[in-house]
Amino acid sequence: MKLHEKILTHFLSCTSPVDKEGYLYKKKERNATYYRRWFVLKANLLFYQERPADRHLLGVIVLEGCTVQMLDSDGFFPFALQFGSGLKTYRFAAGDAQTQGRWVKALFLASHCYLSNLVRDLGRQYEEAKQQQDPTNSCSSLKSLSPPTNSLLVPALFPLSLVREGRSFSASDALPPPSMPTKMAAKKSPKKWPRRNAHVTPLNGPAPPYGEWPLVGSDPLVEFSKLHDFYGQEVKKAREEWLRSRQTEKEQREKDLIDLG
Amino acid sequence: MRFNEKELVCLSRQPSEMAAELGMRGPKKGDVVKRRLVKLVVNFLFYFRIDEEEPIGALLLEQCRVEREDSQTFSIAFLDEAERKYLFECDSEEQCKEWTDSIIKASYEFMRRNLIFYRTEIHRLTGKDPLEQYGISDETRFQVNSGSQLMARDTSSL
């Protein structure tokens, strides 16, 4: 099948916003080595090249029909884009937990499907908000889409599928020979997810078997309510853990105060 | 340039509301109209030989201009090359309108603009940012002022 490349490269270089760019390691299928590449994420397309200034693009990945998986490995920050059975799995690695987390999130949000559902949801909220502002105006310009739902179809909080891989990579194994002037981060466990908005389970906790992120897009409305329930539990758990740790912190602080007194 | 061809072909097989046999003509001089199965999936326009499983090609519907050429024909121009157009012949005026509307609305950038509009309006009407509940209000791709965002670049060194 011919992919009209010029259209893609034109899109890449035009003025519409770049959604994310940066260095990542990409695993080559054939020799299982990771190569550092410069990635540019725009809309639902992930372009990659050797260096940011390069004219020549090495490739592009169309981000539809894939799941994003955060992988867990000591001192190494891998993640993967998994297309369906019989299709490819792209493997990447970041230099630190924060970069890893940001890319996983960005890639998850990148699909056309995701945006389409989000727009539909917001469109509904917009109409509702307008109605509330002006209840006398009963006509809605919005074409009736799907049947009205009685519960919030919140496309759940940013989901995180944590898969613990059996093998552990050491920095020297995973990375290509040291022509790259980069240092691997100290072999500590990845830090807690720092973002205040994303309710995700800390990466350094034991990885419960969350299972794979269901393929969004097949039946979006159904998927969202399923996801909402599924991640509602995860959020609850994360919140409880967080509250517990806060309580411990608080107690610790109070103890200190007493000591000082 | 490498691309995930197998996965894209798989995408082309997804059900789509906009799939029809149209007359299609390429942009080059000397190209003639051929009957193709044209299918719109996400922001790609796939075109197949009739009764073939794998598409001949895929056109990304971003940064393109869709125009009505006459009552039953529309064109898509890419690369700012107004003269390099793909032509599509429909069976009716209604079908032609349906296709042009759908193609325009399928563009990611079009959808993003809608999102930003809704986000701004909902915030104006309710005082709340609707993206907060999804945990995505800081994401670059949903920003109201794209381009002037601090987070646009992540040149993290590895």
Image (cartoon, rainbow, N blue to C red):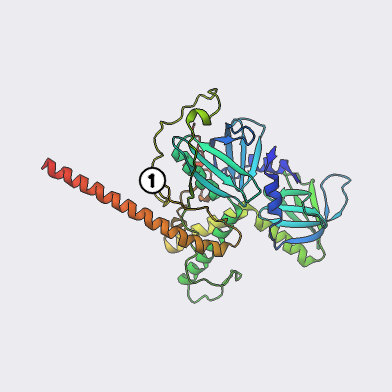
**Quadrant position of the C terminus of chain A in the picture:** top left
Q: Position of residue A30 (x, y in %)?
A: 64, 34
Q: Residues within 10 Å of mark 1 (few under 14, many from 20)?
A: few
**Residue found at the far left of this picture:** A261
- Element type where label 1 sits in the image: loop
Q: Position of residue A20 (x, y in %)?
A: 54, 42
Residue A79 vs B21, above or below: the answer is above
| In the image: residue A56, left or right of residue B153 | right
Q: Nearer the viewer, residue A136 or A226?
A: A226
**Residue found at the far front of this picture:** A166
Amino acid type assigned to the residue bearing label 1 in the image: Gly
Residue B7 vs A59, above or below: the answer is below
Q: Nearer the viewer, residue A23 or A33?
A: A33
Q: Is residue A250 visible?
A: yes
**Residue found at the far top of this picture:** A179
Q: Which residue is mark 1?
A: A205
